[in-house]
Every structure is written in C-alpha cells, then in structure tokens.
Amino acid sequence: MNPQVATAPRRQKGIGRLWREVKKNRSPYLFIAPFFTAFLVFMLYPVLYSFYLSFHRFKRPGVIPYIGIRNYQILLQDPVFWESLKNTVVIGLGYVPIMLFLGLVVAVLLNSQYLKFRTGFRIAYFLPYITSLVVVSLVFSLIYDRNYGILNWALSWVGLGPINWLSDARFAKLSIIILMIWRWTGYNMVLMLAGLQSIPNTLYEAAVIDGASPMQSFFRVTVPMMRPVILFCSVLSTIGTFKMFTEPYILTGGGPVNSSTTVVLYLYQVGFDYLRFGYASTIAYVIFVIVLVLSIIQVKYFGNNDEERA
Amino acid sequence: MSSAAVGENRAGIGTIITYALLFIGALLSLFPFYWMFVSSLKQIGDIFTYPPILFTMKLSLDNFRQLFAEYDFMRNVFNSGVVSVGFTAISMFICTLAGFGFGKYKFPGKDFLFYFLLATMMIPIETTVIPLYMIMIKFGWLNTYPALMAPGLAYGFGVFWIKQYVENVPDDLLDAARIDGCTEFMIYYRIILPVIRPALAALAIFLFMRTWNDFLWPLIVIRTEEMYTIPLALSSFLGLLRIPYDLIMAGSALATAPLIIVFLLLQRQFISGILAGTVKG
C-alpha cells in the first residue's frame, strides 16, 4: 500500500545498505528527527550525565574529580536524607489511602444514571487539579494561618486548637496531607469513574436479586471489581509523592527542622542552595531508581493503561 | 405492598444522603477557590481578622490595581503567556510530526526507537534538573525563554498520544493523496492534522496547563524579576518582610481564572487530555 513500506531486496551490504535504507525512508526519519534531537540533548544526555556526576565531586566547571562511591556512602549516613525519605513515605501513607477511598466513593455516587447535576459535581471535584500548585499552596497557607486562618476558626467551634499548622513539627506533614487529599481526590475520581463504567451491570442486578444492600454491593461487587484501577491509582499517586516539591517548598519550606522536607525538596536544596551538584545527582539517582521500580510495577501489572483512556 | 413501600422509602433516604454527601464534598472542594477570589477583593486588614469574614460587601479591585501598578505583574503574565503558548506550539509541531512518523511508516529501527521513547517517559524531570541546569549554562540560556521551554520538548508522551490517533487514520486516505501528487509533508499538514484535531485539542490543553503551572524548573533557571513567570512572581512575595497576601490572592486569582474558563468551555477535551497524561504519571 504505502510506497515507503515496500522492502527493498536485502542483498546489499554494510554501510552502503544502511545509507540506502535511510535515504529510502527519509520521510519518517525527518519527521522523528526534531523530537529525537530534543530527546538526546534534554533527556538522554542528562540522565547519563547525572549518573556520571553521582560519582564525582563538582567543584567548578572543568574541575570535577572522581570520588568513586563516596557520595553514596555519604548518602547512607545523611540523617537529613533519611528524614526526607521518611517524610515522603509518611505523607504518602497519610494521603493516598484516604484520597483513594474518597475518590472511589464519589465516583460510585456520581456513576448513578439518575443523579442530577452530574456535570456540575464533576467540575467541582475536578477543579483543584487544574490549579497551579503554587496557587493552591498559597491559598492553603492563608487557610492554615494560626491566628486568622479559617481552619482554626472552624476547629474552635468544636473546641479544638488553635493549631500551629505550618510551624509545629507535629502538624506540618498533616497540613501537606490535607492539601494533597483536597487536590487529588477529584483527579482519582475521574480515573475511577472510567473504571466503574466497565463493570457489567448484571453483577449489580444479581446482587440486588440476592438481596444485597447498597453497602454490601459496594464492598462485595464494586471494590473487588475495581481492584486493578485502585491499584493503578495508588501506584500513580505513590510515584507522584516521590516527586513532591512545590507544596512543602511554599507551605513550610521543609520545616520546622526538616519535619516536612521531601526528597525532591532536599535534592533542590543540596543542588541549588549548597551547589553540591555531585551529591545532588546521587540523591537524584536514588529517587530515579525508586520511581523506576514503581513504574515497572505499574507497567507490568497494568499494561499501558488503555482502558483508562476516555 | 409494604415491602415495596419500604424499598421506595429507603431509596428516598439513600438519594437524600447521596446528594448531601456530594454537596458537602463539592463545597469543600470549591471553598479554597471562593476564599481565593473573595480574599483577592478584600483589603489586607479584612483578610487578617478574627473571626474571619466569610461574606462581605466591602470588595474592591484595589489589589489588582496595585499589583499592576507597583509590581509590574503584567510582565509576569506576559512571560507566562509567551512561554506557555510558545512551548505548546513548538511541542505540538514536534509531537505530531514524530507521531505521524511512528504511526504511518515502517522503517529500520522503528520499534527500538519507540520503545526507547516509551521507557524514558518514566523518568521524572525532577531527577535530571542538575545536568539540565548545566546544559543551560553552557548554552548561555539561563534566565531566557528558551531555557523555560526546551527541556519539556523531550517528553515522549505527546508522541505516544498522537501516534495512537494517527494509526487510526485510514491508509487509503494517504494513498489517494499520494496519487494526487501530495508530498509526505503535505499529507501531514493537509490530511493528518485536520483528521486528528480532537486529539490535538486535548494534547494542547494538557501541555499548556503543565507549562502555565510549572514551578520547579522556572525556579531553577530564572534569575531576575522581569523574567519571572506568574508562579515565580507569586512565590517571590513570600520573601518580603510583610507578606502582601492581598496581592498574592489577586495574582493567584489571575493565574487561575484562565484555566477555569478554558476548563468550563472545553471540559471533555480537558478531561481526556488529562486522563491521557496519566500514562506519563
């Protein structure tokens, strides 16, 4: 069909043959060339160079002595790094389950055909996701204000507080967790809504015939059928957690005393506050490996997410 | 029939509970937006009072006036606009071209290159900022628009997304065009692009939103106030001795309003673009 597709006789040899192939196929090569140029310069090279840097001490351009696995040894004994890793995991464990549960509940409620204002509800829940994280964090820092914040005012109605949300080490992580739940529930709800639509209605009809209450059919039909989607969402959110930067940077600056520093925030501080490019690259590679492992899990168990696409 | 009546009654209560839950959730979800817009119209003294003023008629556009008059916020809006529109346009061109190449041709190395591209979609940009920063220094691009736009061009996601749509374009359409004497590039321009237009809208929205809201990378490569994008300008207010939350909220409202408007107008494309974006994570 396609003139470019017809394969030439494969008799020629070596470079000459390769060159003829390239010339014969020059259209597709030209079409993908701009992308791969950007790709080589801004993706492949940085990934490789980052690996190289992680075994070096960067003093100034041109003076980059090799120091072996020294950076990795330092990393293992760096209390701030471990603290930031712990914070990241705690924040993740704090918001992911709640967010997934809320997302699923809202998706189930919105999935009913008889519901009115569905679009309106969907817009309301989804809006947090489209907003810039900087804006979100700034608005929340106003809401969290110790003396004038509306959250402490609301809590005072039930006799709680006032809580020093952003500068008390016990609450700094919690304030980030609340922000994350607020921002990501709607997004996960949309993913789950797509999943819900693939559950056959006959299952629910059978449950009703067997006398199941709505609660029972939620826990016995919906949750088991949605397991793949829930798992997919949880891996996705976990990957997102390991990339978290803006929320702690704006809300708490990682403080007080590193109680809300995340791994990427620490990477940023080491790299651009202390200008330790070699060591920062080591941190980057550890994050890279964590995200890679999570991504492989995701691809392995969930394919390339075809059914989720609208 | 008493059992039917009970069933109906239960359904009635269930419906009320459903609406109540959804309504409370929606209220919580929307409240920060309300608070942002209202605060942007309040004087700073009315923002910091206890108890907080939930409703007030004492609203004015003074904060916006001050933001533009004293801080040259227009410049920040301009920077964000140039970078987001510029990046989206360039990235769309590169992605659609490559997506066409991968979707409609066979050539040696195709599978290898494509899987390579897929594999690198997992790499978080956060982990490559150090070498990228050094590249920007080498290119002399620090504190320029190209620095803000260039690294994002290397993401394979857009290519992947376009390829799937291009594959569905019938080959007969392309062959007919070739018989009529179209060059391969004309096929791309005259046939592929118009046919996959819905996919383009979704991708454009996704790319624009990502660049408009981007923070970490601009924070690294931008050095002077006149080059600040909106998120940078807003976060820089936090460094002031007395943090002008009235102006911050005004700027936040300005940063958010365009996205909300586009979202309300193009809700379906928006959501499908964002769902597609999950492939990248």
Image (cartoon, rainbow, N blue to C red):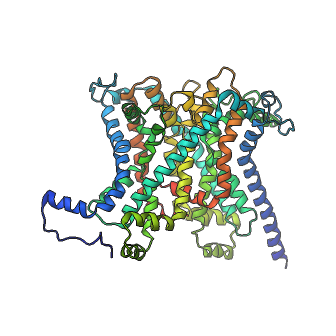
Q: Residue at point 39% right, 55% down?
A: B118
The N terminus of chain A - image quarter? bottom left
Which residue is outermost to the front? B181
Q: In which quarter of the image is residue A300?
A: bottom left
Q: Residue at point 47% right, 42% down?
A: B149
The C terminus of chain A - image quarter? bottom right
Answer with left or right where residue A219 lies relative to residue A282: right
Quick check: A8 above or below B207? below
Observer able to see residue A300: no
Answer with left or right where residue A248 lies relative to residue B120: right
Quick check: A13 above or below A54? below
Observer able to see residue A109: yes
- Count numbered badges in the picture: 0
Answer with left or right where residue A83 lies relative to residue A194: left
Which residue is outermost to the right? B57
Q: In which quarter of the image is residue B179?
A: bottom left
Answer with left or right where residue B38 lies relative to residue A190: right
Residue B163 location (% of width, % of height): 42, 62
Residue A51 location (% of width, % of height): 32, 37
